[in-house]
Image (cartoon, helix red, strand yellow):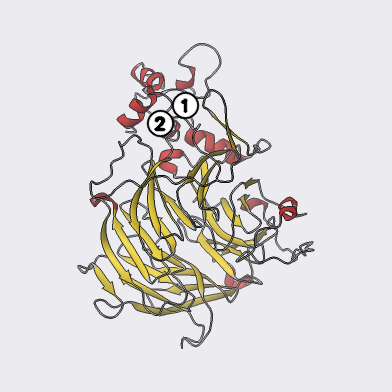
Amino acid sequence: MYGIPSWAIIGDMGYALSRLEIGSDCDGDMSTSASGEAQVSNKPLNNLDDEIAQLTRMKSGPSAHLSQVLPGKPEVYISPVKMLAGRECNYSGKGRFSAGDCCHVLSRYLPVNGPWLVDQMTSRAYVSQFSSDGSLFVAGFQGSHIRIYNVDSGWKVQKNILAKSLRWTITDTSLSPDQRYLVYASMSPIIHIVNVTSAETESLANVTEIHEGLDFCAHGDGRDSFGIFSVKFSTDGRELVAGSSDDSIYVYDLETNKLSLRILAHRSDVNTVCFADETGHLVYSGSDDTFCKVWDRRCFISKGKAAGILEGHVEGITFIDSRGDGRYLISNGKDQTIKLWDIRKMSNNATHYNRPRNYDWDYRWMDYPPHAKNLMHPRDRSLATYKGHSVLRTLIRCYFSPEYSTGQKYIYTGSHNSCVYIYDLLTGVLVATLKHHKSPVRDCSWHPQYPMLVSSSWDGDVVKWEFPGSGEAPTPPNKKRVRRRHFY
């Protein structure tokens, strides 16, 4: 039976705690009205009239019966008090809330208060991710450290991993579906695997524990010179898929302990890969060649090419996140945009887009030219484009918000300007901006069930943002709250 937490109902009875009039733009583009309600300057999308709009409204909106509790036109937002009254009167005919009813309430409680300190390191944070059930949290740092925190035990460090043979930084990590193993990658063709459930808290590579090396070289001798930017476990935990700096996608079979497939996938670095859904048949990839590609593993051997190509970005792609339905995905691009895609709109082939550049630009150390922000791809197949954050210096990541608590009605991203941005998926409106960090936020993660978001930054801080405010956050006594830093 679906239920709404008591804090959600109490919060709605208080003044505006549940409202989305929260947030400020790190660049100062947010204005405030006399009533105190934030006026977001980000221009809304032109009516995202697509199937995803209907699906999102169904997953995150109240049932038609509850929206008609009072006579007249259906209300856009139904308060928890009215929804409880409707449930008690059995307006739905089911005697309970639907998943959409719960999301309608919970999705208004954004994790924007705080932040509270989780950890503070002396090196840059590159990775920060909750496990699929939210019980564990993984943070990876440039200084060879990977820490796994037990969220349910007051963020106690369950595993402190000192990486082996690190080149430059931890580029990515991935937990196995059963949460027994973690793999970590760097700018090397060797990915290492660690047993997370072992008794040892301190995991020093080949000192206190064995960090087995998985060789992704085609020749199996470790001599190839390339780095791994992205790695993911398959949903059954039997395989790894990885994107590399040699323009390729690799698939590694963990049962046979050998490389099973290499795809020369793009014309430049493959910065990101992910599975489209739980079947594991479809794989998405994104590259510096500006293309998102869709790969169907069931027919790759016979065809030897991508199932389809999605064009729209005018600069390289830093990250891809799947909605999990095998149809929709979002991508973060060095053209300073997030794009929403439907793979049914992909083309069978594409010619390399000759970008009309009259400037020399490298995102690793240069600002994006102002006039380039208006460039548009002539064959843009995306459904929507979201702007406001900045994608510079590093491969900044973006995600759909959780299905359970929000119905995936938001997308969120880190940013070079030290903030976390949260956009409304359907309108494109910037609904919240989280400010604390002093350096780029490369990664951030929203808890799959609770209104809690954790951000990590190159300043070494790992902090959590929650819905409860005024000191009400369930923060262990040994974790102090971080004073919010404002930058002008």
User: What's the amino acid at mark 1?
Assistant: Ser
Which quarter of the image is occupied by the N terminus? top left
Image point (32%, 31%), residue name:
7
Residue 256 percent across, percent down from the top left: 39, 78
Q: Residue furthest top?
A: 71
- Whichever of labels 2 and 1 marks the residue nearer the N terminus, that label is 1
Q: Nearer the viewer, residue 227 or 1?
A: 227
Q: Is residue 119 above or below residue 44?
A: below
Marks 2 and 1, how far apart at CA: 7 Å
Q: How many other residues sit within 10 Å of disc 1, few (<14), some (14-19) or many (≥20)?
A: some
- Work out whether 192 lies above or below 473: below
Q: Which residue is mark 1?
A: 63
**What residue did someone put label 2 on?**
98
Q: Is residue 121 visible?
A: yes
Would you say 259 lies left or right of 135 here? right
Q: Residues within 10 Å of mark 2 (few under 14, many from 20)?
A: some
Mark 2 element type: loop
**Image quadrant in which you'd find residue 310:** bottom right
- Mark 2 and mark 1 in contact? Answer it, CB < 8 Å: yes
Horizontally, residue 389 falls left or right of residue 377, namely left
- x, y percentage for residue 250? 51, 73
Which amino acid type is marked by label 2? Ser
Res 65 seen here: no
Question: Which residue is at 35% across, 66% downward?
Answer: 146
Q: Which mark is residue 420?
A: none
Q: Residue at x 57, y 52 (%)?
A: 330
